[in-house]
Image (cartoon, grey):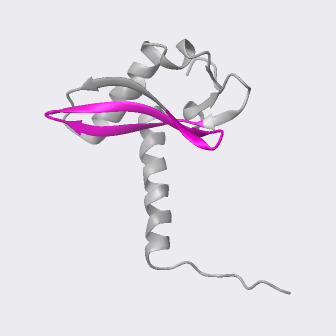
Amino acid sequence: MRKEAMTISGAGARMNRKTREAAAEQDAAAGGTDFRKMRTKTGDVVTVSLSVSPSGSASRLILRFKWGGGTVQRPVATIEAASRMEALREGWRLIRENKVVEKEGWSWVVAGS
């Protein structure tokens, strides 16, 4: 039985576009796609994202990635930022400066990221 190709439209297409836009935003803030790639303790390579949640007048930053059938989350910081992009850039800087990944026994795929 032959399966027909399906064209996604409506909410599905918007979601895909939103996902692409969110990835591009994360890539720009991190310094590029490669700088978001992380190796877990088991050697699996995952793509890390930062969640930005308003917390009063500040933004709460959480490192997130999908792994082993779930979502792993680690708090990064709560900061003041003029925009979402500013919060993301500062969050990526803090992740590296505070060695959030390394403290968990994980490592960046790209050395020096």
Where residue 87 sits, quadrant-wise, is top left
In the depicted structure, whether residue 12 falls above or below residue 106 = below
For the residue pair 97 and 72, the one nearer the viewer reads as 72
Please name the residue shown 70% across and 82% down the image.
5
Q: Position of residue 85 (x, y in %)?
A: 31, 39
Q: Main secondary structure of the magenta part?
A: strand
In the depicted structure, whether residue 19 falls above or below residue 45 = below
Q: Is residue 15 left or right of residue 57?
A: right
Quadrant (top left/top right/bottom left/bottom right) for the C terminus: top right
Direction right: furthest residue:
1
Q: Report whether residue 107 is seen.
A: yes
In the depicted structure, whether residue 23 falls above or below residue 62 = below
For the residue pair 31 and 102, the one nearer the viewer reads as 102
Q: Is residue 41 left or right of residue 32?
A: right
Where residue 80 sits, quadrant-wise, is top left
In the depicted structure, whether residue 27 falls above or below residue 19 = above
As for residue 63 lying within the magenta part, the answer is: yes
Q: Is residue 66 left or right of residue 53?
A: right
Q: Position of residue 27 (x, y in %)?
A: 48, 41
Where residue 74 sits, quadrant-wise, is top left
For the residue pair 7 and 113, the one nearer the viewer reads as 7
Q: Position of residue 71 (x, y in %)?
A: 53, 40
As for residue 69 lying within the magenta part, the answer is: yes
Provide the residue span drawn in magenta. 47-72
Quadrant (top left/top right/bottom left/bottom right) for the N terminus: bottom right
Q: Report whether residue 32 is seen.
A: no
Please name the residue shown 38% across and 39% down the image.
51
